[in-house]
Image (cartoon, grey):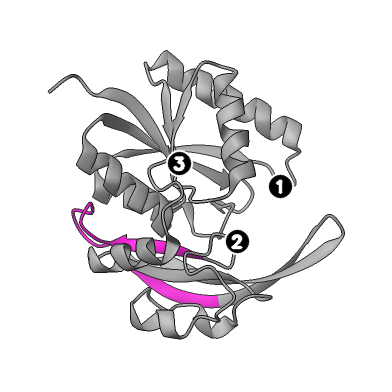
């Protein structure tokens, strides 16, 4: 077999990035050197869904791949974000990494943004889940034996009662008909705590539910988050 090209995978701790990693590890075309995660510096949590940094670190330890964390300030501007990301990507290139892997499924504008930013510094993008049917991906994820808990919901799309539920085939019947079952439109986010690529399950305790409102382009988006506490 030819030598594997070095890559990093954009990781959130959720099901899509985990399934993308599952595919990549099975394919054996790339050697994943890092799981790259953006963390809110003030809160020490993943920007996207509020999972604690320590739990992401434990995921990487169980998977056996180092987590590389980029700490972002609150209310970071797009200009500052791009500069910080470019610096990180240049560090990746210094380590001989020229490929970035993402778990995006069908958000065209996000894919184009990622490709453009990376092309400017001579890196390529790989999207293992791109354009796959989200219902089939959901079923595959569950049937492979992965365990994932819903940790955030967009309250315009899903109720708080979904927080803390594990993804299952039965849960498909509970989702409203107008949502994407993989949450590709931001309906929900997950934390994966066990499965084929994990050497051991991640231990955690379920904490409180926190509600927050975010304003984007003048529109208010209400979210609810389930705090998962590190279990020693």
**Residue 74 drawn at (x, y percent):** 71, 47
Q: Are marks 1 and 3 in contact (CB under 8 Å)?
A: no
Q: Quadrant of the N terminus?
A: top left
In the image, which is nearer the foreground, mark 2 or mark 1? 2
CA gap between label 1 and label 3 equals 24 Å
Which is more toward the observer, 42 or 154?
A: 154
Query: With 213 as the anchor, is 131 left or right in this view?
Result: left
Residue 229, by quadrant, is: bottom left
In the image, which is nearer the foreground, mark 1 or mark 3? 3
Q: Which residue is mark 3?
A: 102
Mark 3 crowdedness (10 Å alpha carbons): few <14, some 14-19, many ≥20: many
Which is more toward the observer, 61 or 189?
A: 189
**Residue 213 drawn at (x, y percent):** 75, 68
Which badge, 3 or 2, comes first in the chain's sequence?
3
Q: Residue at x 37, y 60 (%)?
A: 137
Numbered badge on residue 185: 2
Query: With 176 as the anchor, is 18 left or right in this view?
Result: left
Extreme residue in the right direction: 218
Classify 155 as above or below 40: below
Q: Which residue is mark 1?
A: 74
């Amino acid at each position: 077999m030819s030598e594997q090209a070095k890559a990093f995978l954009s990781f959130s701790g959720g099901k899509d990035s985990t399934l993308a990693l599952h595919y990549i590890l099975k394919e054996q075309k790339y050697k994943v050197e890092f799981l790259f995660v953006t963390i809110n510096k003030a809160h020490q949590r993943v920007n996207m869904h509020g999972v604690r940094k320590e739990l992401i670190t434990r995921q990487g330890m169980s998977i056996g791949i180092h987590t590389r964390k980029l700490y972002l300030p609150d209310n970071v501007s797009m200009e500052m974000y791009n500069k910080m990301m470019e610096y990180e990507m240049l560090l990746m290139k210094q380590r001989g990494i020229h490929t970035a892997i993402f778990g995006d499924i069908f958000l065209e504008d996000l894919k184009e943004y990622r490709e453009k930013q990376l092309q400017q510094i001579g890196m390529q993008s790989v999207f293992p889940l791109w354009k796959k049917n989200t219902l089939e991906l959901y079923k595959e994820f569950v049937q492979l034996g992965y365990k994932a808990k819903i940790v955030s919901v967009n309250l315009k799309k899903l109720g708080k009662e979904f927080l803390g539920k594990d993804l299952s085939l039965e849960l498909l019947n509970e989702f409203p008909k107008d949502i994407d079952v993989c949450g590709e439109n931001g309906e929900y986010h997950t934390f994966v705590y066990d499965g084929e690529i994990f050497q051991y399950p991640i231990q955690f305790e379920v904490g409180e539910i926190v509600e927050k409102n975010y304003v984007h382009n003048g529109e208010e988006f209400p979210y609810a988050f389930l705090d998962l506490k590190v279990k020693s």
